Image: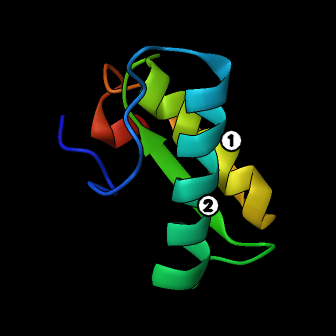
């Protein structure tokens, strides 16, 4: 999977500090780059992995609501 923000710090080694750095980098990108703000909704379409968690946490830092969609659910049910 291609990262949403290629310039975000990597999660290697996977430490809480690196997770925090990546979450803040994504949150800055969401706010400054995409204009995401409180009340907006973000669809997280993906598996239960670290990157999905990063996106959810970053969205919450901007005040947006993250809606998780399981990729196994057919499009007709979304």
Q: Is residue 67 visible?
A: no
Against 46, residue 24 (above or below) is below
Q: Is residue 69 above or below residue 72?
A: below
Colour convention of the picture: rainbow
In terms of image quadrants, where is residue 49?
top left
Classed neighbour count for the residue bearing mark 1: other residues with Cα under 10 Å, few (<14), some (14–19), many (≥20): many
Q: Residue 27 placed where, x, y %?
A: 61, 60
Q: At 46% across and 81% down in the image, what residue appears?
A: 33
Whole-percent x, y for residue 68 in the image: 56, 35
Do residues under tags 2 and 1 come within 8 Å of each other at their CB atoms? Answer: yes
Quadrant holding the C terminus: top left
Position in image of residue 63 (x %, y %): 81, 64
Residue drawn at point x = 41 percent, y = 43 percent: 9
For image coordinates 32% across by 27% down, the residue present is 71
Depth check: 77 or 19 in front?
Answer: 19
Q: Is residue 63 above or below residue 50?
A: below
| Location of mark 2 (residue) | 27
Q: Name the residue beneath numbered marker 1.
A: 57
Q: Which mark is residue 40?
A: none
Q: Earlier in the sequence, mark 2 or mark 1?
A: 2
Residue 3 position (above or below residue 52) = below
Q: Residue furthest left?
A: 2
Query: From this viewpoint, is residue 50 visible?
Result: yes
Element on which disc 2 rests:
helix
- What residue lies at 55% left-to-right and 37% top-to-bottom? 54
Q: Quadrant of the N terminus?
A: top left
* Mark count: 2
Q: State left or right for residue 6 relative to residue 55.
A: left
Give the SS element for disc 1. helix
């Amino acid at each position: 999977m291609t990262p949403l923000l290629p310039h975000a710090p990597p999660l290697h080694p996977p430490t809480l500090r690196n997770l925090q750095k990546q979450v803040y980098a994504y949150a800055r990108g969401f706010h400054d780059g995409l204009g995401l703000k409180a009340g907006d909704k973000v669809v997280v379409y993906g598996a239960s992995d670290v990157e999905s968690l990063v996106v959810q946490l970053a969205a919450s830092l901007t005040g947006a609501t993250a809606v998780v969609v399981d990729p196994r659910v057919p499009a007709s049910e979304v």
